[in-house]
Image (cartoon, grey):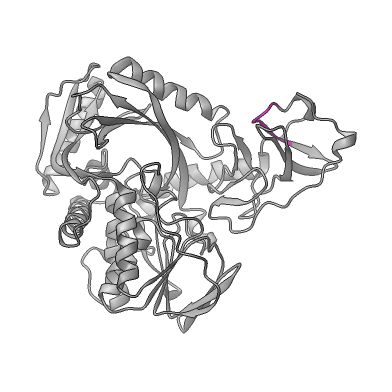
């Protein structure tokens, strides 16, 4: 984000028509838009904030077919054919990114690197060997390797010829290509409603309306079908810290360990001959962590203890959606064939997001795709996910009933940068205090499905522990699936002095 400036695309105003409306300007939305304008479609893209400044703009941008233990897990939950289909689809997505960068001359720091999965214990090593065998059966050229790292590992699984890139440079280029081909991209145009059926859809924002026979919902967590997605995906938040390596230093590969706590790291070019080290991990359920600031501190300790870096230069967090059976949901909504969604990439959005765009393009164009049924919303995977369905939705039920209320709230004790949910005259109120000392009070009830929000100390936001919606201290929506702001609550501040 610090190294790129995107153009101001303006807001959607009035009424516009298109062949396809794409909701979201991240990797799914912009890749879909480009493929569809290349097919001759009139495409309109609506982005709630800025282009490539949402979840896609805050990824560590590993572009790889190796997704942890995915192939052994898919073989166990489904069968070897499903694992092979997954490998073929991910490989095709990686190839598409390379082809677009080459044919469209996209400068985005694309580098070929190996993806390396690390085992730190003997038990991990056993799992690693099983994954190596499953990945080989899926058609991937993997090998068990020795790697030199500043901390001990029991073994490593290496997948060569993978890639890493500057995803925002890539996506801004895609947006420019879409516009140059006649597509329209609008920013600051948060969708508030999608209505219609297969005969046509109206997509409304606060400023305007767009109509089209086809809508692609690429908003990370879909803003449609809450009854389906709220019980079948769950959001997790993870963290990244970054610092400049000593001159001449590099790490040859993209690394991630097998067992929690997750440590994921890779480097990126800075343009002056030096490289930036990115270290990620410390994931947890959205809205279910008491001290998210400590997550950053833990990653910083790991980074500075193990690598020759300077002071921490950047830190950020991001959000990922996980499905019950380990496969993303990509395709048309059953009851509405003109309505397409893509979500649940499980932390591997660069290849899965590109794949989603390929599947969307084929579905819109009426083309047969050999992978579509594997990722379809209506796939049969009850046996593969029944236990997890119960676990995840029991957790949501607890959050909906319990919340996080202070039984004896003392508003005077809210520190600068802090927030607390309190009960005021029978209403659950989320009260926070900014760095300037200003007090904000909003309803603590998430506008998506009624869960009680909790304070995120690292990001100064109210986060929903059920489905991952996030709100600014003043109640504005930062992250869906919620589309309505939290209601502002007027506090009688003179009678309720909030001190330092």
Residue with the most extreme front position: 272
- Is 295 placed above or below 76 here? above
User: From which residue to which does the magenta span run?
Assistant: 415-421
- Is 483 placed above or below 185 here? above
Horizontally, residue 42 falls left or right of residue 120, namely right
Asked whether the viewer can see residue 365, the reply is yes
Residue 454, given in percent of the width and then of the height, sits at: 63, 38
Horizontally, residue 151 falls left or right of residue 208, namely left
Residue with the most extreme bottom position: 199
Residue 295, given in percent of the width and then of the height, sits at: 47, 27
Quarter of the rendering containing residue 406: top right
Q: Camera-side residue: 493 or 193? A: 493
Residue at 34% of width from left, 75% of height from top? 182
Horizontally, residue 99 falls left or right of residue 200, namely left
- Quadrant of the image containing the N terminus: top left
Q: Camera-side residue: 323 or 296? A: 296
Residue 223, given in percent of the width and then of the height, sits at: 52, 61
Horizontally, residue 164 falls left or right of residue 217, namely left
How many marks the image carries: the answer is 0
- Quadrant of the image containing the C terminus: top right
- Is 241 placed above or below 215 here? above
Residue 477, given in percent of the width and then of the height, sits at: 59, 52
Residue at 88% of width from left, 36% of height from top? 494
């Amino acid at each position: 984000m610090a190294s790129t400036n995107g153009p101001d695309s303006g807001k959607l105003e009035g009424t516009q028509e298109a062949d396809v409306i794409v909701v979201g300007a991240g990797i799914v939305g912009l890749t879909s838009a480009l493929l569809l304008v290349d097919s001759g479609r009139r495409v309109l893209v609506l982005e709630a904030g800025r282009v490539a400044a949402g979840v896609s703009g805050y990824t560590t941008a590993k572009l790889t077919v190796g997704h942890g233990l995915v192939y052994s897990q898919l073989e166990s939950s489904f069968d070897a054919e499903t694992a092979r289909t997954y490998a073929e689809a991910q490989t095709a997505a990686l190839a598409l990114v390379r082809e677009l960068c080459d044919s469209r001359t996209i400068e985005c720091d694309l580098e070929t690197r190996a993806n390396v999965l690390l085992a730190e214990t003997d038990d991990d090593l056993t799992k690693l060997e099983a994954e190596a065998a499953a990945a080989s059966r899926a058609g991937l050229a993997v090998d068990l390797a020795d790697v030199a790292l500043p901390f001990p590992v029991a073994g490593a699984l290496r997948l060569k010829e993978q890639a890493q890139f500057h995803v925002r440079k890539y996506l801004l280029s895609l947006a420019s290509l879409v516009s140059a081909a006649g597509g329209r991209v609008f920013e600051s145009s948060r969708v508030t409603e999608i209505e219609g059926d297969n005969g046509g859809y109206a997509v409304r924002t606060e400023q305007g309306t767009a109509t089209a026979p086809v809508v692609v919902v690429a908003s990370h967590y879909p803003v449609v079908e809450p009854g389906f997605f709220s019980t079948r995906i769950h959001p997790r938040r993870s963290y990244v810290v970054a610092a400049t390596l000593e001159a001449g230093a590099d790490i040859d590969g993209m690394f991630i360990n097998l067992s929690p706590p997750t440590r994921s790291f890779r480097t990126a070019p800075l343009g002056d001959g030096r490289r930036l080290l990115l270290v990620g991990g410390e994931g947890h359920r959205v809205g279910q962590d008491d001290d998210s600031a400590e997550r950053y501190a833990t990653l910083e300790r790991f980074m500075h203890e193990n690598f020759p870096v300077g002071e921490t230069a950047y830190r950020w967090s991001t959000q990922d959606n996980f499905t019950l059976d380990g496969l993303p949901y990509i395709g048309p909504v059953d009851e509405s064939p003109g309505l397409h969604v893509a979500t649940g990439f499980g932390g591997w959005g660069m290849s899965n997001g590109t794949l989603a765009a390929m599947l969307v393009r084929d579905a819109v164009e009426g083309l047969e795709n050999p992978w579509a049924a594997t990722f379809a919303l209506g796939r049969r995977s009850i046996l593969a996910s029944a236990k997890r369905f119960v676990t995840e939705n029991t957790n949501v039920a607890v959050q909906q009933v319990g919340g996080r209320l202070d039984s004896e709230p003392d508003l005077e004790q809210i520190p600068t940068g802090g927030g607390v949910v309190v009960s005021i005259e029978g209403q659950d109120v989320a009260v926070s205090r900014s760095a300037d000392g200003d007090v904000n009070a909003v309803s603590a009830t998430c506008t998506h499905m009624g869960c009680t929000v909790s304070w995120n100390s690292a990001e100064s936001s109210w986060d929903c522990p059920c489905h991952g919606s996030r709100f600014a201290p003043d109640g504005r929506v930062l992250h869906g699936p919620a589309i309505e702001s939290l209601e502002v609550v007027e506090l009688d501040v003179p009678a309720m002095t909030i001190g330092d």
